[in-house]
């Protein structure tokens, strides 16, 4: 009898532990689909005030190295930034929780801010999607 009691006792203890907050944890809880992070994508170009020169304005020609995006959650006012290599001309944010964000854009070089672009207010990040932000144009001197 004691030879069979041990497996039954083990099964009983396991059954007690499941879903009762004791013993081994069950599978992780399912993530609420409405909280699945999304991203935003955008592209940028540079326009110079001296467009009659016949040459394109490039990051190298104005000494720009990065594009800094300021990101503010319009609901919580939490803020942070992301930096992109200027020469790429396109970027995609990291994961953002679904919300409405206000975005600011700065073109940076070794000496600091070279130009800013008009802010984008009300960018809605949807769950598990990529929100396209209208094209950004930096008007450089």
Image (spheres, rainbow, N blue to C red):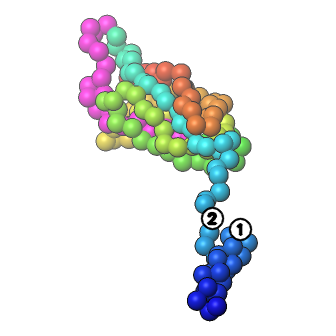
Q: Is residue 113 visible in the rendered structure shown here?
A: no
The residue that appears at 66% across and 84% down in the rendered structure is 9
Which mark is on residue 99? none
In the rendering, at what x and y percent does residue 30 appear?
Answer: 65, 52
Q: Which residues are magenta?
A: 52-71
Give the answer, above or below, for where 52 lies relative to 105.
above
Nearest to the observer: residue 34 or residue 96: 34
The residue that appears at 42% across and 41% down in the rendered structure is 83
Residue 59 is a magenta residue: yes
The residue that appears at 49% across and 33% down in the rendered structure is 105
**Dot 2: few (<14), some (14–19), or many (≥20) neighbours within 10 Å?**
few
Tell me whether circle 2 and circle 1 mark residues in contact (CB < 8 Å): yes
**Dot 1: few (<14), some (14–19), or many (≥20) neighbours within 10 Å?**
few
Which mark is on residue 19? 1
Nearest to the observer: residue 113 or residue 79: 79
| Quadrant (top left/top right/bottom left/bottom right) for the N terminus | bottom right
Q: Identify the element where label 1 is drawn.
A: loop
Q: Identify the element where label 2 is drawn.
A: loop
Give the residue pinned by disc 2.
Answer: 26
């Amino acid at each position: 009898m004691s030879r069979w009691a041990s497996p039954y006792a083990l099964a009983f203890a396991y059954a007690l532990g499941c879903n009762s907050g004791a013993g081994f944890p069950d599978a992780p809880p399912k993530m609420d689909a409405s909280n699945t992070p999304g991203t935003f994508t955008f592209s940028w170009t540079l326009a110079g005030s001296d467009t009659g020169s016949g040459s394109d304005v490039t990051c190298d020609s104005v000494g720009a190295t990065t594009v800094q995006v300021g990101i503010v959650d319009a609901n919580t006012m939490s803020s942070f930034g992301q930096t992109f290599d200027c020469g790429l001309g396109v970027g995609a944010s990291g994961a953002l929780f679904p919300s409405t964000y206000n975005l600011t854009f700065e073109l940076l070089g070794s000496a600091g801010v070279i130009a800013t672009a008009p802010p984008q207010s009300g960018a809605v990040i949807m769950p598990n999607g990529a929100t396209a932000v209208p094209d950004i144009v930096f008007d450089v001197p």
